[in-house]
Every structure is written in C-alpha cells, then in structure tokens.
Image (cartoon, grey):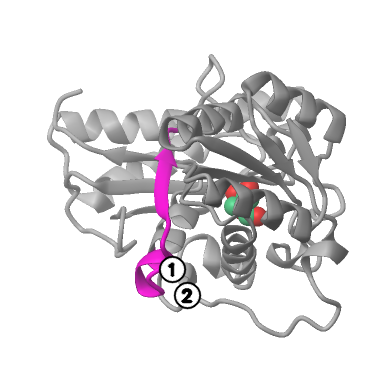
Amino acid sequence: MKVLKTKAEMSAVAESWRIENLDVGLVPTMGFLHEGHLSLIRIARQHADKVVVSIFVNPTQFAPGEDFAAYPRDEARDLAMCEAEGADVVFLPSPEEMYAPDASVALTENRLAKTMCGLTRPTHFQGVLTVVNKLFNITRADSAVFGMKDAQQLAVIRRMVRDLDMPIAIVPGPIVREPDGLAMSSRNTYLSADERRHALCLRRSLDLAEAMWRRGDSAADAVLGAMREQIAPTPGAVIDYIVAVDADSLEPVETLRPNTLVALAVKIGRTRLIDNTILNKKTP
Ligand code: PAF
C-alpha cells in the first residue's frame, strides 16, 4: 500500500492506472476509521480494480466554533487498518497541500443543502462538495463510495454529480451499527459512558418509526411526533431535527411511502449525532 501526501503524486499514480485501463474506486474519509469505513473500502473493491482511501479532515466543512481542532485523529492506526483491508493507496494530504492560501472557488448546492443539517450548518455542504470534487479530480476516480449514515451528504453529492455531469458513479454504503444499535461514527468517541447509553435513543426512535410504518401508520406527523415523544425523556438529549423526506429530493413527505428517509439529528450533551433509515417495504 502506498501512502501519498501530494496531489501531484496521487494524480501521477491515478494516471498510470488509467493508462493500464484500471478502474479507480475512491473512499473519501476524515480518518479515525471504524468498521463503517472498512465496509466502504470493501464495497469500493467490488466496483474497482484499484482502491484509494483519502484521509483528510477538511477544514472548509467545519464552521468556526465546530469541532475541527478536536476532531479525533490517529494516522498510524488508520494506515494499519487500510493496509489490512487491502487498500492500494492512502491519499493523506495536509490542508496546505489541498488548498491554496488564496483559494476562491467553492461549489454550492442550492436546494438540498439548505434543509436538515444545512439549517444549523449553513456552510457545511459547500465545504463537503468542494473537497469531494477536488478529490474526484485528483484521484481520477471512476466510482466513489459514501456511507448512508450521512444521507443528506449522499443526496447532495448525487445532485452535484447529476447537475454537473461528473463522470463518476456514486455508490452508497449501508449504515454499520454497534451491536447495541448505535450507528458507527468517529464522533462517538466524544461520548461519556452515560451519554453513550443515552445515544441509543436515536436508533430506538427509528425502530419505532419503522414499526409504525410496518403496521400501517403512514401519517408523517404522527410518526415524527411519536419519535419526539420517545426521545424527550432522554437525559441531555436535545433534538435538532426529525424529518420524513424523499431520500433523493429531500422534500418533506406528509405520507410515508417507500424511499422515504426518516432522519434525525440529536445533541447528546455536547455531541451532535445523526442517524436515519430509509423505509422500503411494508413488511421487512
Ligand atoms: O463524510 C465525510 O467523512 C466527509 O464529509 C467527506 C465526504 C470525507 C468530505 O470531507
């Protein structure tokens, strides 16, 4: 496995693969890898001959006062995990390598990025789209895998690829959960033991939504209300949003139907967690 720190090295390797007619799969990450990321590497492998994992805590997607500085980092462990998973290259640039000091171009999505997380993080998706587009260009990727826990990110990236005719396939990776149901996230490391227990309220409220949907309760208001009521008594839990939206357009739905994304963001103490489910069939 090669570890490349400059854009020039990464592009040169990508170009050599292209000449050999090899497909490149990209797994963009911010490091502090967990089983969820590893599952994305395995999915990338199914779609590509060569797999690049990028590890870059992207400053432009954090607003002032967010957790950029505190975001967990463990380069040595991340590299060992990528190697064990059979990644071909880890692209590990510094912020100075990625962004010119006077960088003045950014990519904005004007609809999907304005809702849900975009309401409290209005600059977040501009940072995500800009860096993701740069990573696509630098790695010359044919496909890229994104986790479905970040359902809004996935929808916004798909919209970018569609609207800008980017020649890349976007592959979703299913949410990977801890045995007790908590969605894996690098930010789970912020949780104290008590908060870790309380964080289960996210998954439990999604279980409730799925159960209501299965027994035929399809009024979004009733389902979202029941989820709120269930989370309310959890100590330290503050709901940011709970929504039922179309998984592609992120437009709110009044009546739950297949492909409805039920998503929520909840602060547990100082840690903001997100989780979601996509309703598919009436019966599991
Ligand atoms: O999902 C993430 O970890 C990040 O938002 C991404 C896609 C790597 C862009 O920095």
What is the secondary structure assignment of the residue under circle 1?
Answer: helix
Image check: 170 left or right of 185?
A: left
What is the secondary structure assignment of the residue under circle 2?
Answer: loop
Q: Which residue occupies the foreground of this view, 210 or 78?
A: 78
Task: Reply above or below: 50 against 266.
Answer: above
User: Toward which corner of the image does residue 162 lie, by quadrant?
Assistant: bottom left
Residue 132 point in image, percent of width and height: 59, 60
Residue 236 point in image, percent of width and height: 67, 40
Image check: 225 left or right of 44?
A: left
The answer to whether residue 86 is seen in the rendering is yes
Image check: 260 left or right of 143?
A: left
Mark seen at residue 160: 1
Q: Which residues are magenta?
A: 159-174
Name the quadrant of the N terminus. Answer: top right
Residue 215 point in image, percent of width and height: 15, 29
Count all numbered tags in the image, as a single digit.
Answer: 2
Does the beta carbon at disc 1 come under 8 Å from ligand 1?
A: no
Does the beta carbon at disc 2 come under 8 Å from ligand 1?
A: no
Residue position marked by numbered label 2 in the rendering: 109
**Counting other residues with Cα less than 10 Å from the Cα at mark 1, is it few (<14), some (14-19), or many (20 or more)?**
some
Q: Are marks 1 and 2 in contact (CB under 8 Å)?
A: yes
Query: Of the residues tagged 1 and 2, which is closer to the observer?
Result: 1
Q: Which residue occupies the foreground of this view, 53 or 113?
A: 53
The answer to whether residue 191 is seen in the rendering is no
